[in-house]
Image (spheres, rainbow, N blue to C red):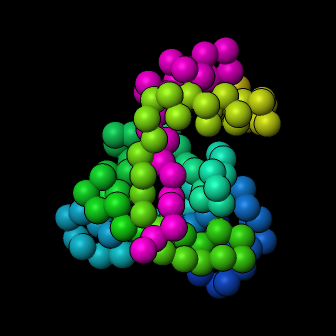
Amino acid sequence: MYRLPLVAYRVHLGRLLGRRFLRLGHTGRVSGRLRHTVLEVVAELDGDPVVVAAFAPRCDWYRNLLADPAASVAWGRVARPAAARFLSEGEAADVLADYVRRHPRSARNIGRLLGLDLVDDPQAAAGVLPVVRLARGR
């Protein structure tokens, strides 16, 4: 079930997921092969999508971006190269606080799943959750 969004992007229907989700293309740090994952966009900074690595440092896409920040995104009707920029704890706290304001129910559920008080203390959550801006690639 969780792979259905990837299938939607593969058959060129990813735009149906809107701008709340994107497909991230990244290079495997060990294999060197192109990998894809679908992520929730938690914010938009100057037109760049921002995502959270909820299960870092274990999630492969996050570890792959640490090894090689060059990536690609398919987001809404746009597909483009991107470069991962890892936000500071202060920037991450601002992004998470804004997400809580816009999506309180989702934030509460995600916080419960991760064992974090995301709703009442986004600053503490920012110290644990890496937040990644997918800036326009060069």
Is 80 left, or right, of 46 in this rendering?
left
**Which residue sits furthest left?**
30
**Extent of the magenta region:** 114-138
Residue drawn at the location 25% of the way across and 57% of the way down: 67
Residue at the spot 45% in from the left edge and 71% down from the top edge: 137
Q: Position of residue 103 (x, y in %)?
A: 77, 36
User: Does the magenta segment cover residue 117?
Assistant: yes
In the rendered image, the residue lying farthest to the bottom is 11
Q: Quadrant of residue 79?
A: bottom right
* Front position in the image: 84 or 59: 84
Residue 86 image offset from top left, x and y in percent: 41, 46
Q: Quadrant of residue 21?
A: bottom right
Give the residue drawn at x 79%, y 36%: 102
* Vertical position of residue 127 compared to residue 91: above or below: above
Q: Quadrant of the C terminus?
A: bottom left
Q: Is residue 134 left or right of residue 43?
A: left
For the image, the number of numbered tags is 0
Q: Determine whether 29 is above or below 105 in the image.
A: below
Q: Is residue 128 magenta?
A: yes
Name the foreground residue: 124 vs 61.
124
Q: Quadrant of the N terminus?
A: bottom right
Residue 99: % across, % down: 70, 36
**Quadrant of res 101:** top right
Viewer can see residue 86: yes
